[in-house]
Amino acid sequence: MAGKKRIVIVGAGPGGLTAGMILTHRGLDVTVVERLERPGGRNGPLVFDGFSFDIGPTFLMMKHILDKMFALAGHSSEDYLKFTRLSPMYRLHYEDRHLDVHDEDERMRAELARAFPGEERGLQPFMDRERKRFAYLWPCFEKDYSSFTRYFSRDFISAIPHFAIGRSVIDVLGDSFTDERAKLAFTFQAKYLGMSPWVCPGAFAIIAFFEHELGIYHVEGGLSRISEAMAEVVRRNGGSIRLSTEAKRVLFKGRRAVGVELADGTRLMADAVVLNADFGHAMTRLLPKGVAPYPSAKLKRKKYSCSTFMLYLGLDKDYGLPHHNIVFAKGYQKNVDAVFEGGVTEDDVSFYVRNASASDRTVSPPGKSQLYVLVPVPNRMVGRQDWKTLTPRLREKVLAQMEGRLGLKGLSEHIVAERMITPQQWEEDYNVFVGATFNLAHSLDQMLSLRPHNRLEKVKGVYIVGGGTHPGSGLPTIYESGRISADLLCEDLGVPVKG
């Protein structure tokens, strides 16, 4: 490795691993340090009692972006991972009906006609409009916004009319659908960004388009297998991954990063540092005071996503649920508003349930199944809940609603293994700033160059990847953040960019 540029990556999450794969393929000497004992961070596995759960992401959309990242690292994703395209993609549960959502237009129109007669006429106009929006907007998300000069590019200027400025996702869906329940089928995706569809910028209506145009995939063994495969690529490309290794701080000479100090006092010197820790945590814990461009006071003025209350349930039976299930609260807007105002509507919550066992028998012991349950709740900046008191009560309320809304009779009696994660645990055990599981909110004043830059401002040699930087949260955009940061780093160090 003599003579090679040395890079230290803090955090083996999907963004850091993407950067690591690409940088090792370009011939850099890369060391990834990860505090946890497995790679992935929030995209890692939670394994207990013979069950294997994904900690966080469970939807894989825009698979071609993942394929591209492996290709940029000199590998094929298909050599490491087994993909299943889901059909239906998911089931939406309303108070009095359900809707199976398909990525085949004919089947989707038929399903809309069954559940919401007349609304099927809006599908084609929606797809046509969002396909056009995607063609203009996506090139903007693929570029870095380290400079305001990006706003004068031809791509950006052409995209301006398609940002739906001043309109929410709900507003945009009103152009295609009239029934409020039908709109929800194409707007709940704002949850991927941790935002309310009544507030989330209208440009993000393209997320539902991604799903319908490109499909949703499951990875055998869970989406955490993606992180494990990426880690393997880093190693095969000559990089090093050090698990159970905590970074204490980034080392600076003046305002230039020169390495990373570990919790045990070891110093890893480097020509550049990539931070894949949660953004708020990295700014407040890993960068010295006086150097960090985002001190605590500035971070507290930012807008953050909601948090999540998680249940990971191992069962001694299989209820036969579809793979993905979204249950809307009876008073959905009231429930969503409460979450972002700091409250929890315990008796009427919205929640998501994944039954991975419907598509994958490897994640549970023979004869058993598992349910992953996510409940949007306030982050710890706006919420003042005492989670030690609320946790057992909310658990019982959610299980009761799963029995009632999903027909899982006797659910509690069939739980043989269980784990929970609360906003407090997200913050304390996973270093997620204020427990905001989806990181910084995606409001217009926190997008593109107004979002923390991939090449960190006001310092040299520090690059940011993950949901807290451009292009944003969600696996496809996090992969892109890893690629963008790798390209910037190579540009700054004079390393040729391959691919």
Image (spheres, helix red, strand yellow):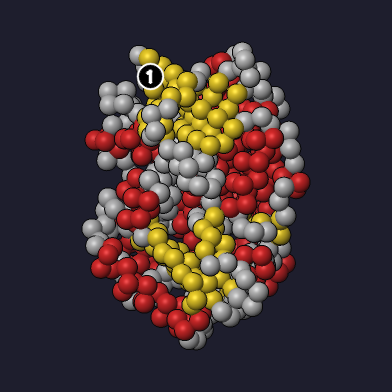
Q: Residue at x 55, y 45 (%)?
A: 39
Q: Residue at x 53, y 67 (%)?
A: 49
SS label for mark 1: strand
In terms of image quadrants, where is residue 45?
A: bottom right
Is residue 100 among what the camera can see? Answer: no
* Residue 364 on image: x %, y %: 61, 69
Which of the two residues, 311 or 150, is positioned nearer the viewer here?
311
* Residue 215 on image: x %, y %: 67, 57
Q: Quadrant of the C terminus?
A: top right
Say left or right for 496 vs 424.
Answer: right
Is residue 262 among what the camera can see? Answer: yes
Q: Residue furthest bottom?
A: 409
Q: Residue at x 26, y 57 (%)?
A: 383
Q: Amino acid at mark 1?
A: Phe
Q: How many marks?
A: 1
Against 437, is 233 above or below?
Answer: above
Q: Residue at x 66, y 41 (%)?
A: 232
* Residue 247 on image: x %, y %: 42, 34
* Residue 66 on image: x %, y %: 65, 44
Q: Count residues near mark 1 (Cα–Cα under 10 Å), then give few for <14, some for 14-19, many for 20+.
A: some
Say left or right for 62 vs 313.
Answer: right
Which of the two residues, 108 or 52, is positioned nearer the viewer here?
52
- Where does label 1 land, which residue? 252
Against 42, is 163 above or below?
Answer: above
Say left or right for 332 vs 297.
Answer: right
Q: Quadrant of the N terminus?
A: top right
